[in-house]
Image (tube, grey):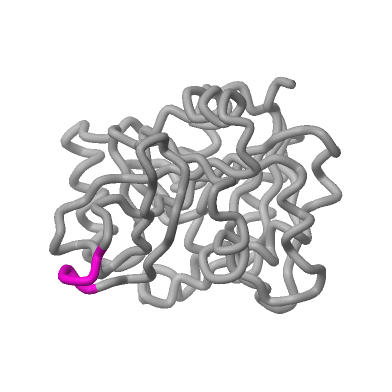
Amino acid sequence: MTVTKAMIMAAGVGSRLAPVTDNLPKPLVPIAGKTVMDIALGKLRKAGITQVIANLYSHSEKIIEHYKHDANFHYIVEETLSGTAGGVKKCQFFFEPGESFVVLSGDGLTDADIARAIKIHEKSDAIATIGIKKVPAQQLSNFGVVVTDKTGFVTGFQEKPSVQQAKGSHINTGIYIFKYEIFEYIPADTFFDFAKDVFPQLLGKIMTFEVTEYWSDIGTLEQYEESIRDAREGKVTV
């Protein structure tokens, strides 16, 4: 089945990006004249995605205003934050049984080949496929580390391990492709995270694809400034 739908997790407050996010939602921060979410939507369209839904929270009205003329952009507004998986669960109505769909973080800037990721997901028959990125050892403690077997299936996760404790060199990029069955592992109306609550239930059923292209988690002011420089220097396509 062709993958045509996606969700962007856009409910983050972006407190570490203050004061940029004091009056601006994190997905609308500008990179080289475009918002982070505009860039993500462009990458999704390139991969054949035609319909997108986002969960909104902080400054939601500004995102709604920004996309009011985009008939292919849908949204829900969360009254209380429900975690990464909880937010996706609230969008279950948007997807159909039997179909797979893409999920992206609203604060990610990447040139990852999403179309290739979808093909890997479909070939593997995994419930979930996640994008992983190799980073220098000294950076591993800032991210969730993904441990895989030789075939690419996930055998374990480590949340921000020390360099000495890290069992792998690849981190979770927040780029996911899910089968509809993922919703069976997420309870309704419950704060639930993928990394802590969902993925540990699915070890052996999660495939990975390596992101060799540009990827940045725009989580801090330093990372945001670095991403702006990278865009100006042509290191990432915007």
Measuring from the top left, give residue 184's x and y in whole percent: 79, 56
Residue at 40%, 50% in the rendered image = 173
Is the residue 70 above or below the residue 94 in the image?
A: above
What predominant SS class does the magenta segment belong to? loop
On screen, residue 234 versus residue 132, left or right, reads: left
So how many labels did they put on this image?
Answer: 0
Is the residue 159 above or below the residue 114 in the image?
A: below
Residue at 44%, 70% in the rendered image = 21
Please say whether residue 136 is one of the residues in the magenta stretch: no
On screen, residue 18 versus residue 174, left or right, reads: left
Measuring from the top left, give residue 153's x and y in whole percent: 47, 42
Measuring from the top left, give residue 196's x and y in whole percent: 53, 70
Is the residue 62 above or below the residue 151 in the image?
A: below
Is the residue 140 above or below the residue 102 in the image?
A: below
Please say whether residue 164 is one of the residues in the magenta stretch: yes
Front residue (pair 69, 85) = 85
- In the image, the segment drawn in magenta is 162-166
Residue at 32%, 44% in the rendered image = 215
